[in-house]
């Protein structure tokens, strides 16, 4: 079972449709679930202290949705970058160890709380480029699909 837990709702129709398409493509390989948790308002004029409160509140909402037995892959700019092949190999390694509950976590626009970082098993940087956190859902879903295609020796570059 794979879960993607993300902060906030997908607002753009094209993002919802694209993400739904990849979730559908993943379903023959494994069960997948997208969970959205409420995000907090974070005006640009927030103080650093206010921003930390936002991250803590969002982190608590996400942590409530994570079960003890789940392997948590946290999207984090300070994380390790993977190629698509490396991601597939990491997923296969987890499945080989009977770790079959993978949870990808996408925090809010300000980042994630320290508690969420501590709970994660792996921190993954999908790119050194900056993407809107909503776009990350589509990218993560696509990369999960690509990983399954690689693992099943199916074409994945088209």
Image (cartoon, grey):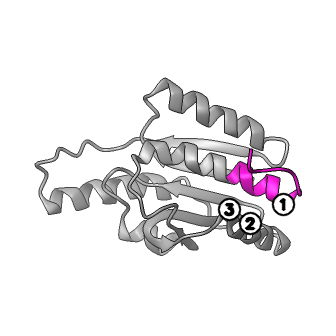
* Residue that carries the numbered disc 2 in the rendered image: 91
Residue at left offset 85%, top offset 42%: 28
Cβ–Cβ under 8 Å for marks 1 and 2: yes
Query: Residue 67's x, y, as percent?
Result: 61, 60
Left or right: residue 52 compared with residue 2: left
Q: How far apart, in angstroms, are the residues tagged by discs 1 and 3?
A: 11 Å
Image position of 144 with respect to 8: above or below: below
Residue at left offset 13%, top offset 51%: 46
Q: Residues within 10 Å of mark 2 (few under 14, many from 20)?
A: some
Left or right: residue 75 compared with residue 151: left
Q: Earlier in the sequence, mark 1 or mark 3?
A: 3
Q: Nearer the viewer, mark 1 or mark 2?
A: 1
Range of residues picked out in magenta: 144-158
Q: Residues within 10 Å of mark 3 (few under 14, many from 20)?
A: some
Badge number at residue 143: none
Q: Nearer the viewer, mark 2 or mark 3?
A: 3
Cβ–Cβ under 8 Å for marks 1 and 3: no
Q: Which quadrant, please, contains the C terminus?
A: top right
Is residue 154 part of the magenta span, yes or no? yes
Residue at left offset 60%, top offset 36%: 19
* Residue that carries the numbered disc 1 in the rendered image: 151
Left or right: residue 19 compared with residue 77: right
- Residue 21 falls in which quadrant of the image? top right
Query: Residue 1's x, y, as percent?
Result: 75, 53
Is residue 17 part of the magenta span, yes or no? no
Q: How far apart, in angstroms, are the residues tagged by discs 1 and 2?
A: 9 Å
* Residue that carries the numbered disc 3 in the rendered image: 84
Left or right: residue 117 compared with residue 69: left
Q: Residues within 10 Å of mark 1 (few under 14, many from 20)?
A: some
């Amino acid at each position: 079972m794979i879960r993607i837990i993300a902060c906030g709702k997908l607002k753009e129709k094209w993002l919802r449709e694209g993400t739904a398409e990849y979730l559908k493509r993943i379903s023959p390989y494994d069960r997948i679930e997208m969970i959205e948790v409420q995000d907090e308002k974070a005006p640009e004029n927030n103080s650093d202290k206010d921003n930390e409160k936002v991250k803590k509140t969002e982190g608590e909402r996400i942590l409530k949705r994570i079960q003890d037995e789940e392997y948590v892959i946290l999207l984090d700019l300070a994380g390790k970058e993977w190629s698509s092949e490396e991601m597939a190999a990491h997923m296969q390694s987890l499945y080989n160890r009977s770790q079959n509950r993978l949870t990808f976590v996408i925090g809010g626009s300000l980042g994630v709380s320290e508690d969420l970082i501590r709970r994660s098993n792996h921190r993954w940087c999908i790119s050194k480029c900056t993407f809107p956190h909503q776009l990350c859902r589509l990218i993560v879903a696509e990369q999960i699909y690509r990983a399954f295609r690689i693992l099943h020796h199916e074409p994945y570059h088209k």
